[in-house]
Image (cartoon, grey):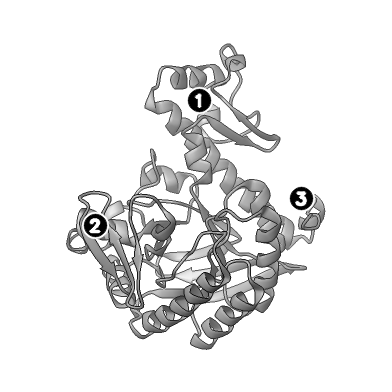
Amino acid sequence: MFKLTATENQARVGKLYTNHGAIETPCFMPVATKGCVKTLSSRELEELEVNAIISNAFLLYLKPGIETIENCGGIHNFMNFKKTIFTDSGGFQVIREGFQPKISKKGIMLRSPFDNSKHLLTPEKCMQIQGSLNSDVAMVLDECPPYGLQYKDYVESVERTIKWAEECKKNKNKRQLLFGIVQGGTFRDLREKCIKKLISLDFDGYAIGGLSVGEPKIKMFETLEFSVKLLPKQKPRYLMGVGSPKDLIKCISLGIDIFDSSFPTRNARHGEVYTKNGKYNITKSKFKNDFSPLEEGCGCFTCREYTRAYIHHLFKVNEFLGMRLTTIHNLYHFQSLMKEIREAIKSGEFYEKFEVGNLH
């Protein structure tokens, strides 16, 4: 169930109720592709007040295997993470290197990156895998084409996405929430067709996929703005794979509730630090003798305990701890940003406080 609790123009605050608690939205989910957020423990995630993460069902099916996770009592027990877990179907792997996808009406044939074995991911199998994982929110199988293909390719993608969504709905696990995924590239007619059909199937929430896959930023925002207006107001809206602070703020102003991205954690492992005053790279030589925290006034563990000089040193000598400490800080920053945004919407100050302008 999803309940709106506050609105300011298109921006919304709400609560998504799952088997492992309620998530207040707008929210940002760190990516735990293979069952962990890289470099962090589940306890650290909880200390960072991360209430939801997303894992990749297909990769977990390959390793360690569904039987192992079932024997442990499900993905929450396996990871020892007691908050909300979303699972993606694996359809996004179509545009990732190494999976050698072959798409047919039945589903997607993917190669395992672990042993090169072939696996046919069908809507029914997708639901069986996610049901066995016992995640809180499952995603339908969809086809996510990259930007720059011909119109007919997106037509075929939407047709398959709709057909697979119907089959996923028929095989839905009653214990889970199930989200449909909107495709259609940057073509309004295809997005509208996909949305109308998915709404008729009455999913628990609606994700917008196929954006931030190479298209110009202005096209992403225009497509998003058009799509959001067609989605039901009483259901959660989830934009997949978008994660920079600037983009999050803009997308929230357009009515998005839920985000996921490896953006803060991946960039942290390359020394990129996010603060209220922008970003910087801790590996730069000017930080060698800087004994201030990563961000003045930040309450995260990293900023309370360590200096820029020390973390700079860790990166220069390739010590893994440097990646962990910057990851902790970045996720703290993102969670704090979401909390600040929610409070601003509740008080009617979001658009002014965050200086949200037009799409250009």
Amino acid at circle 3: Phe
Residue under label 3: 354
Amino acid at circle 2: Leu
For label 1, the SS is helix
Query: How many other residues sit within 10 Å of disc 3, few (<14), some (14-19) or many (≥20)?
Result: some
Residue under label 1: 305
Query: How many other residues sit within 10 Å of disc 1, few (<14), some (14-19) or many (≥20)?
Result: few
From the viewer's perspective, is the residue at label 3 or at label 1 nearer? 3
- Asked if one can make out residue 75 in the rendered structure from this viewpoint, the answer is no
Residue at the farthest top position: 289
Q: What number is the disc on residue 62?
A: 2
Location of residue 52 in the rendering, given as x and y in whole percent from the top left corner: 46, 57
Compared to residue 164, the image places residue 111 above or below, namely above
Q: Earlier in the sequence, mark 2 or mark 1?
A: 2
| Horizontal side, residue 147 vs residue 230: left or right | left
From the viewer's perspective, is the residue at label 2 or at label 1 nearer? 2
- Asked if one can make out residue 223 in the rendered structure from this viewpoint, the answer is yes
From the viewer's perspective, is the residue at label 2 or at label 3 nearer? 2
| Horizontal side, residue 177 vs residue 352: left or right | left
State how far apart marks 2 and 1 are (Cα): 39 Å
| Horizontal side, residue 216 vs residue 184: left or right | right
Compared to residue 123, the image places residue 11 above or below, namely above
